[in-house]
Amino acid sequence: MKIMSVVGARPQFVKLAPIAHALQAAGHEHVIVHTGQHYDPMLSDVFFRDLGIPEPDAHLGVGSGSHGVQTGAMLAQMDEVLERFWPDCVLVYGDTNSTLAAAVSAVKLHFPVAHLEAGLRSFNRAMPEEHNRVLTDHAADLCLAPTEVAMRHLATEGLSERSVLVGDVMTDVLFQVRDAVLAGGTENPLADLHAPDGYYVATIHRAENTDDPERLREVVQALGDADRPVVLLAHPRVRAKAEEHGISLDAGSLVTRDPLAYPELIAAALGSAGVVTDSGGLQKEAFLLRVPCTTVRRETEWVETIELGWNVLANTSEEITAALTRPAPAATEEAPYGDGRAAERAVEAIIAGVKPR
Ligand code: UD1
């Protein structure tokens, strides 16, 4: 079978890695299309290199823009790419503008679509990612869900018959990279901080935390007031917005560094006293590494991390301060994100469930 993966943003490259390996192991043909949504080398190239992902077969080079401009630029190019490669199935990942654009172009040309990481919901309709995931699930022929909770959301929306629980593919990668890091493969890039009481690793990039200067100031202030160093691995969006509004990202406890490659990020998180983030992926990675997480949002799609006590939602500066200094969570053996073999199951579900065009 010929499967086309369409990816464009950092978390999608992480999810692509185990799928690329599983497709190769099962002897299928795999075409990779990179939309170019993320183009900084530290947000894109290093993931292909470190996670052993083959070079993309096509690169759309769309770059940044408003939602309409960015999504439209992808749509305008996808018809030609689909007709050139003529895949048996188009696989889209997660919830970015690249996900929605690829799903819409493929269904319009009657190519079967499978959506990996289907069924996640924040129920916050102000988030661009929420529109992307709902629209993509309803366009897709096959919804590959990471959790039981995601399966329930798909059922509520009438999509049970096209949904399969496969587990979370980010868990597949995380376990492999964690084991390699623990075996001594990667130094902790934050060891040079010499923080005797440890440090927190932070990432902040969501529009709701970065685009309004008052909101960004509040988050930065709370991180600057933390009880130990907070290393902000700054996504280009947060750097650009802070500069535009004259907000310093190096004040008090806050120290800003460039984003890290994936194995370095895992080494940094493993060595930390906690993670502070608004990223979906990092919340879950923190849980899987059993590092306490503070999520700077009002809601999360990964509710299991909260229920099991390893993640706390903290939106105001008081909540962030309280969450950072909370007592350590209780140990748990629960594995709501699967056993690290989700990619294999996703490939099996595609082969069993997709009728090529
Ligand atoms: C996107 C996804 C989000 C995902 C995140 C991971 C959407 C709507 N959002 O958000 O779901 O969690 O990626 O990082 O698709 N920029 C650069 N260099 C880059 C990429 C972006 O400088 O390589 C800057 C640009 O100024 C751009 C801004 O970051 O305008 C935002 O980039 P964009 O791709 O629109 O969304 P993200 O915030 O990265």
Image (spheres, rainbow, N blue to C red):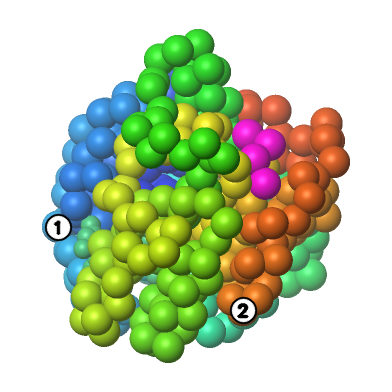
- Residue 52 shows up from this direction: yes
Q: Which residue is mark 1?
A: 61
Q: Residues within 10 Å of mark 1 (few under 14, many from 20)?
A: some
Q: Residue at x 79, y 70 (%)?
A: 156
- Between 134 and 250, the residue placed more toward the observer is 250
Residue 36 lies, in percent from the top left, at 21, 56
View quadrant of ligand 1: bottom left
Residue 297 lies, in percent from the top left, at 60, 71
Camera-nearest label, 2 or 1: 2
Q: Residues within 10 Å of mark 2 (few under 14, many from 20)?
A: some
- Between 332 and 51, the residue placed more toward the observer is 332
Position of residue 14 in the picture relative to residue 354 (left or right): left
Q: Residue at x 29, y 40 (%)?
A: 32
Residue 316: mark in rendering: 2
- CA separation, marks 2 and 1? 37 Å
**Kind of residue at disc 1:** Gly
Q: Quadrant of residue 98?
A: bottom left
Position of residue 265 in the picture relative to residue 148 (left or right): left
**Kind of residue at disc 2:** Thr
Residue 332 lies, in percent from the top left, at 83, 35
Q: Is residue 250 magenta?
A: no
Q: Main secondary structure of the magenta part?
A: loop
Position of residue 109 in the picture relative to residue 113 (left or right): left
Q: Residue at x 46, y 83 (%)?
A: 215
Residue 117 lies, in percent from the top left, at 57, 51
- Report the magenta residues as a range: 288-292
Note whether 39 is above or below 211 in the view shown: above
